[in-house]
Image (spheres, helix red, strand yellow):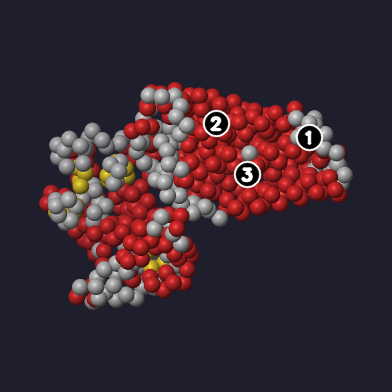
C-alpha cells in the first residue's frame, strides 16, 4: 500500500514515453520473431502477441509511433515506466461519469495507476464491475458495458506488466507441451516462480538494459538466439516452421483485411458515383474509367483471396471457422458474385458486390463482438465438414447480400424520373438479383442438407429443430417465396421483387447473428441471456421502410410508372 501510494497518479505524456524507448528496430524485429504460447495454447510469434495486447488495450497498432514489439519489450523491462501511460481506452459509452472515475484524458485514455485506489490498493471499478457483471446482458446500461470492457483492458495490461503473459520458455519433457513465463499462477498459489525461466529471461533483459546504456546490442541479440534454440530443442513438437513465423509476422505488418476494406470502400464508392452518372450519359472516357475501376476491383479481390489463403496456412484450417473469418469470407464471395454476374456494362452490379464487402468488413473491424485474433479450432469443428458445409452456407450469404443491396440500388433508381437507360438498367439489375437469389437458395439448401449429415455424425441425428437449423429452414422458405412472387397476381413486377429481396436479408441476419447471440442452442454462443439489440438494427429497418415507401410513392404516384412483370 505504501509503495503504491508513492506513485504519482498524474498521467505521463505519451509522446515522451514513446520517444524515450531506445530500442533499435532490428533488435525489436528479432525479438518479435521469438515464439510465445498464448492462453489458448497456440504457439505464435511474440509480434502477434504484442499486437493483440496493444490492440485490445489501446485499440491501435502503435503507441504514439512506438511499435508493438518495442512497447512489449519496454513494458517487460520496466513496468514502473508504464504505470502512468495513457493507454487504457475508456470508450464514449461510459459517458462523463466513467471518465471522471477513471481520470481519463481528453483523448479517452487512462493509466494503470489511475485505476488503482492508492488508499486501498484495490481496482477502482471493482464494485461497479461486479454490479455490471451480475446483471443480465439485456439489462446492462452503456455504462455497465464500458465498465466491463475497461476492466478487461486493465486486467490484460496488468497481467502483461507483471510478466504472466511472457510464456516463452518450454517446460522440459512436459506431455502437454506447456510453456511458461518466469512467473505463473496455480490453484494453490497465485504467485509461483520458475527459476529456469527466470534465469533466461533475466539474462535477456539485463542485456537489453546494457544495450540501452552502451548501444551494443550484440549481447541482447545473442540472448534472443539462445532462447530461440532452447525453444526449438524443448518445444520441437509444437514450434511452427521459420517460414510460417516469417509469414505471420508479415501478415501482422500489412494488416491486409483492414486495408482491403478501405480499398473496397474507395473503389466501390467511385464506381457507385460513375454508375449513377452512367444512367444519364454515355461516353468512351466514362467507360474507360469504369473499366479501370473494375480492374482495380479484380486486383483487390485477388489480394483478398491471397490473404484468406495465408490465414488458412497460418491457422491450419479453413478461414471461415469463427465470426471474423466468416464475415471476411462472405465479403469475398459477395465481390465474386458481383464480378461473375456482371453483364451489359451495368456497373451497378460489381459496385454492389464491393458495397456488400464494405458493409461486412466494416462490421468485422468495427464491432466488439468479432475478434480478428487467430485462434485454435475448437474440437467440434475439426472435421472435413467445416470446409464443405460451412463454406457452402456462408457462400449463400454473399449472394443474398448482393441481391439485397441490388434491391436497395434498384429502389433508389426507381425514385429518379425514368428514361430509357434507367428502365434498361433497372431491368438488368432485377434479372441479376433474381439470378443471385437463385444461386443463393441452391447453396443454402444444399448446405443445410449437408449440415444434417454432419449433425448425424457429431450428435447422432440429422435434424432436431435447433435454432440455427430452424432459421436456416425459415431462410430457405422466405427466399423461395421471393423467387416465386412473379407467379402470384398482385405480387409481380420489379418493385415488389426488389422490396422483397431487400427485406428478406433479415432472415440471414437472424440465422447468422441472431441465433449466435440471442438464442441458446448447439450452434449459438448465447447462454440464454441476450445482449442488447445493437442500434444499427432498428436504424437499418427504419431506413429500409422509408426507402420502400418513397420508391413506391415516387414511382406510382409521381411518375405513374406501371410496374409490369418481366
Left/right of residue 432 with respect to residue 212 in the rendered view? right
Q: Disc 3 and disc 2: Cα gap in Å?
A: 27 Å
Residue at 24% across, 70% down: 121
Q: Helix, strand or loop at disc 3?
A: helix
Residue at 24% across, 54% down: 164
Q: Which residue is mark 2?
A: 473
Compare residues 274 and 554 and report the one nearer the observer. Answer: 554
Name the residue furthest left: 195
Q: Disc 1 and disc 3: Cα gap in Å?
A: 31 Å
Mark 1–mark 2 CB contact (< 8 Å): no
Residue at 54% across, 41% down: 510
Q: Specify the quadrant that holds the N terminus.
A: bottom left
* Image spot of residue 296 (x, y percent): 62, 40
User: Sequence order check: which comes first, mark 3 or mark 2?
Assistant: 3
Q: Which residue is mark 1?
A: 490
Q: Disc 1 and disc 2: Cα gap in Å?
A: 26 Å
* Image spot of residue 44 (x, y percent): 32, 42
Q: Which mark is residue 355?
A: 3
Using the rendered image of the protein, determine whether residue 187 is visible from the camera's viewpoint. Answer: yes
Q: Which mark is residue 239?
A: none
Q: Is residue 158 above or below residue 224?
A: below
Mark 1–mark 3 CB contact (< 8 Å): no
* Image spot of residue 179 (x, y percent): 21, 44
Q: Specify the quadrant that holds the C terminus.
A: top right
- Quadrant location of residue 460? top left
Name the residue furthest right: 560
Q: Which of pointers 3 and 2 indicates the residue nearer the eye?
A: 2
Using the rendered image of the protein, determine whether residue 388 is visible from the camera's viewpoint. Answer: no
Amino acid at each position: 500500500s505504501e509503495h503504491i501510494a508513492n506513485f504519482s497518479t498524474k498521467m505521463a505524456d505519451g509522446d515522451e514515453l514513446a520517444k524515450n524507448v531506445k530500442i533499435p528496430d532490428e533488435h525489436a524485429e528479432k525479438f518479435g520473431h521469438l515464439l510465445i504460447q498464448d492462453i489458448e495454447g497456440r504457439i505464435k510469434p511474440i509480434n502477434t502477441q504484442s499486437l493483440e495486447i496493444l490492440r485490445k488495450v489501446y485499440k491501435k497498432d502503435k503507441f504514439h509511433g512506438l511499435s508493438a514489439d518495442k512497447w512489449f519489450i519496454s513494458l517487460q523491462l520496466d513496468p514502473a515506466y508504464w504505470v502512468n501511460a495513457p493507454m487504457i481506452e475508456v470508450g464514449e459509452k461510459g459517458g462523463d461519469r466513467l471518465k471522471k472515475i477513471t481520470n481519463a484524458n481528453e483523448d479517452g485514455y487512462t493509466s494503470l495507476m489511475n485505476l488503482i485506489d492508492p488508499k486501498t490498493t484495490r481496482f477502482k471499478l471493482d464494485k461497479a464491475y461486479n454490479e455490471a457483471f451480475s446483471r443480465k446482458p439485456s439489462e446492462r446500461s452503456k455504462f455497465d458495458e464500458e465498465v466491463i470492457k475497461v476492466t478487461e483492458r486493465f486486467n490484460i495490461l496488468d497481467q502483461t506488466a507483471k510478466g504472466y503473459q511472457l510464456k516463452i520458455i518450454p517446460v522440459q519433457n512436459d506431455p502437454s507441451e506447456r510453456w511458461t513465463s518466469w512467473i505463473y499462477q496455480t490453484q494453490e498459489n497465485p504467485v509461483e516462480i520458475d527459476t529456469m525461466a527466470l534465469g533466461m529471461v533475466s539474462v535477456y533483459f539485463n542485456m537489453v538494459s546494457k544495450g540501452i546504456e552502451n548501444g551494443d546490442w550484440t549481447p541482447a541479440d545473442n540472448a534472443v538466439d539462445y532462447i530461440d534454440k532452447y525453444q526449438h530443442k524443448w518445444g520441437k513438437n509444437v514450434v511452427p516452421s521459420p517460414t510460417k513465423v516469417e509469414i505471420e509476422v508479415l501478415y501482422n505488418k500489412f494488416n491486409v483485411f483492414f486495408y482491403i476494406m478501405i480499398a473496397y470502400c474507395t473503389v466501390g464508392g467511385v464506381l457507385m458515383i460513375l454508375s449513377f452518372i452512367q444512367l444519364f450519359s454515355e461516353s468512351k472516357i466514362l467507360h474507360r474509367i469504369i473499366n479501370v475501376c473494375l480492374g482495380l476491383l479484380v486486383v483487390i479481390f485477388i489480394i483478398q483471396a491471397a490473404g484468406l489463403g495465408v490465414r488458412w496456412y497460418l491457422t491450419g484450417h479453413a478461414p471461415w471457422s469463427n465470426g471474423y473469418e466468416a464475415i471476411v469470407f462472405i465479403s469475398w464471395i459477395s465481390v465474386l458474385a458481383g464480378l461473375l454476374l456482371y453483364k451489359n456494362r451495368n456497373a451497378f452490379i460489381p459496385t454492389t458486390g464491393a458495397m456488400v464487402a464494405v458493409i461486412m468488413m466494416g462490421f468485422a473491424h468495427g464491432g466488439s463482438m468479432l475478434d480478428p485474433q487467430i485462434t485454435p479450432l475448437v474440437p467440434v469443428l475439426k472435421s472435413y465438414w467445416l470446409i464443405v458445409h460451412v463454406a457452402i452456407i456462408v457462400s449463400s450469404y454473399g449472394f443474398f447480400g448482393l441481391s439485397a443491396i441490388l434491391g436497395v440500388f434498384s429502389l433508389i433508381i426507381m425514385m429518379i424520373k425514368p428514361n430509357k437507360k434507367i428502365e434498361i438498367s433497372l431491368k438488368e439489375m432485377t434479372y441479376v438479383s433474381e439470378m443471385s437469389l437463385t444461386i443463393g437458395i441452391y447453396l443454402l439448401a444444399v448446405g443445410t442438407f449437408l449440415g444434417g449429415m454432419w449433425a448425424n455424425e457429431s450428435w447422432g441425428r440429422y435434424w432436431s429443430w435447433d435454432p440455427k437449423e430452424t432459421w436456416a429452414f425459415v431462410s430457405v422458405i422466405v427466399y423461395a417465396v421471393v423467387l416465386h412472387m412473379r407467379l402470384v397476381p398482385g405480387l409481380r413486377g420489379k418493385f415488389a421483387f426488389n422490396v422483397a429481396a431487400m427485406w428478406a436479408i433479415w432472415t440471414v441476419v437472424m440465422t447468422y447473428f441472431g441465433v449466435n447471440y440471442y438464442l441458446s442452442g448447439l450452434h449459438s454462443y448465447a447462454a440464454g441471456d441476450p445482449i442488447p439489440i445493437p442500434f444499427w438494427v432498428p436504424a437499418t429497418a427504419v431506413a429500409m421502410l422509408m426507402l420502400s415507401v418513397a420508391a413506391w410513392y415516387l414511382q406510382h404516384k409521381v411518375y405513374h410508372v406501371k410496374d409490369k412483370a418481366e
